[in-house]
Image (tube, grey):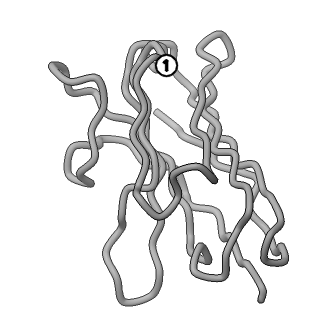
Amino acid sequence: VQLQASGGGLVQAGGSLSLSCAASRRTFMTNPMGWFHQTPGKEREIVAAISGNGEHTYYLGSVKGRFTISRDNAKNTVFLQMNRLKPEDTAVYYCAESTREGRAYYTREFMYDYWGQGTQVTVSS
């Protein structure tokens, strides 16, 4: 199983970036997905999560109204659209896939089984 994240980069505060995460296997279509971020010395933190059918989403409070998570199951891809970026959004962003059942989505790192390689997002002030 492979998750390939892309789309990170350097942007000025107030700008936008769009992250993508492509999964290599077909069962992705039914699995909850999440985006996490991590800064040096800190643990990974959930940014957004989405259910397998895309109908249910979760957002970290600090990104609500600015970030949007979505998925295209036909293309085995999940997206994170990040608008009105702030310097405090600077982090390495990881996509993750959970194979757990029972909930629409998951918000804890240990509930995810597969991880992408991470993509750096840097927001300058």
Secondary element under disc 1, as helix, strand or loop, is: loop
Residue found 63% across the figure and 28% down from its top = 77
Residue at 27%, 38% in the rendered image: 106
Task: Classify residue 21 by image quadrant.
Answer: top right
The amino acid type of the residue labelled 1 equals Gly
Please give left or right for residue 21 compared with residue 102 in the image. Answer: right
Residue linked to disc 1: 54
Residue 29, given in percent of the width and then of the height, sits at: 48, 14
> Is residue 125 found left or right of 47 in the rendered image?
right
Residue at 83% x, 65% y: name it: 15
Total numbered circles: 1
Q: Residue at x 41, y 18 (%)?
A: 52
| Quarter of the view holding residue 44 | bottom left
* Quarter of the image where the C terminus is located: bottom right
Residue 43's quadrant in the figure?
bottom left
Q: Is residue 104 above or below residue 115?
A: above
* 123 up-or-down from 60: above or below: below
Q: Position of residue 117 (x, y in %)?
A: 55, 57
